[in-house]
Amino acid sequence: MSRENWYKVDNVAKVFLATAAKRDTRTLRVSCTLWDDIDGELLQEAVLSAIQERPQFQVRIRRGIFWHYMEDTDLMPVVEEEHGRVCPRLYVPGHMMLHYKVTYYGKRINLDLFHAISDGTGALEFLNIIVGDYLQLKYPDKLGNIVVHSGASEDDLNQDSYKQFFGSVSLKASSLKNAYHPSGLRLPYDQLQFFELQVPTEDILPKAKAIGVGLTSYIGTRLMMAIKEDMPPRKKKQPINVSMPVNLRNYYPSRTARNFFNNVNVAHIFTEEISFEELAREFDQKLKENLAEENIKKQMDNFETMEYFIPIRAVPLFIKQMVVRYGSKVTDKKVSVVLSNLGVQRPPEELTPLIRNYSGFCSSANLFVVMTSYNGVLTLGITSPYANTKVVKSFVRGLSEEDMRVTAYATEVIR
């Protein structure tokens, strides 16, 4: 089936397009580390093969009168050895460019992707297609014809699932209050600092199980406690809010390669003393309530509603973007940290002996943590715009004091 020349962007993409900046580029990165060094020429060949399976990423974003739209492009990706920053700028208005980039360094393959194109689920599947094609090229005698992609049709992959599963028009104001944000100055020159933490799952899973909570709740509570240690007494009445993206494909029969997620929030105000165990159980209960199917669907309908208000639809793009930027700033003030759980990675069984680990990062104006598990290791990618690293240090200390083996890496920044 031939592809359309252009299609509309979804409502989440509209937010990313309006708010992308030099510091928060609205770029996400997913990486796969192998056991052997990467062959750049073979990786280039693998990427050119992978885009035949995912032509949805071969697009340029253009400005219309009322909204942005995407159109097919003949621009071809060029694989390079990694240099420069993590999560680079992949969307600049008016510039002709692809909105994704594949790089490598040592044994690691990186896929950086502008978030308006896809979410973490779509990015990981694209990465796995690239990795699968690369490994089959490198080890043709070991590997046969392995299918990595989902097998979804082109229409399914291109689907705007927000619009497809939208229920009813119903706008409701958020009840969240402005949240506490870590103290201190932001890094100069629009920099972000990236930390990668690795913890054996055999160290951390029994700790969460002993309390009776899930791993996401355990990590979320550790983040809350680390941020609490940064709070001055006069700020104690402000909530600490952990915002968590939710893959809506778990609630709707969607196989889209585009964005299809929403956010749930768990907040706590430290007005009274509370133990870590008590807070973790409270966090877990609130998270389970928010993840109930009826609550997830209500939130999606509320988000999609703005598309159906005639006064909004008729407003020119530059005015809409001003409104979206303002709304995004209001939302950011209500979030202390974002925790995105990409889950346990399960590539095809034939590939697992050749893959060492997976990891991820996301650019952000606030603290952002991406967690993923593979091969008995929990990997946490932490993005911070702050010069002060107290929260990250407190978080690591909290894990270490529980006798967990934590391996930490960090990027260098200019002070």
Image (cartoon, rainbow, N blue to C red):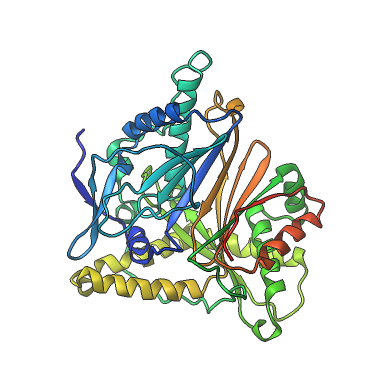
Which x, y percent locates residue 136? 47, 22
From the image, which quarter does the C terminus lie in? bottom right
Task: State whether residue 303 is above or below residue 103.
Answer: below
Which x, y percent locates residue 65? 17, 65
Near-viewer residue (27 or 337): 27
All told, the count of numbered labels is: 0
Quadrant of the image occupied by residue 56: top left
Q: Residue at x 20, y 73 (%)?
A: 315
Near-viewer residue (248 or 94): 94
Furthest-bottom residue in this view: 234
User: Viewed as shown, does residue 257 lie left or right of 209?
Assistant: left
From the image, which quarter does the N terminus lie in? top left
User: Viewed as shown, does residue 52 lie left or right of 101?
Assistant: left
Q: Which residue is drawn at 21% across and 75% down?
A: 311
Q: Which residue is drawn at 76% across and 60% down?
A: 398
Which x, y percent locates residue 150? 41, 34
Task: State whether residue 266 is above or below residue 405.
Answer: below
Furthest-top residue in this view: 141
Quadrant of the image occupied by residue 179: bottom right
User: Viewed as shown, does residue 76 lie left or right of 278?
Assistant: left
Near-viewer residue (250 or 123): 123
User: Viewed as shown, does residue 176 lie left or right of 114?
Assistant: right
Which x, y percent locates residue 44? 40, 31
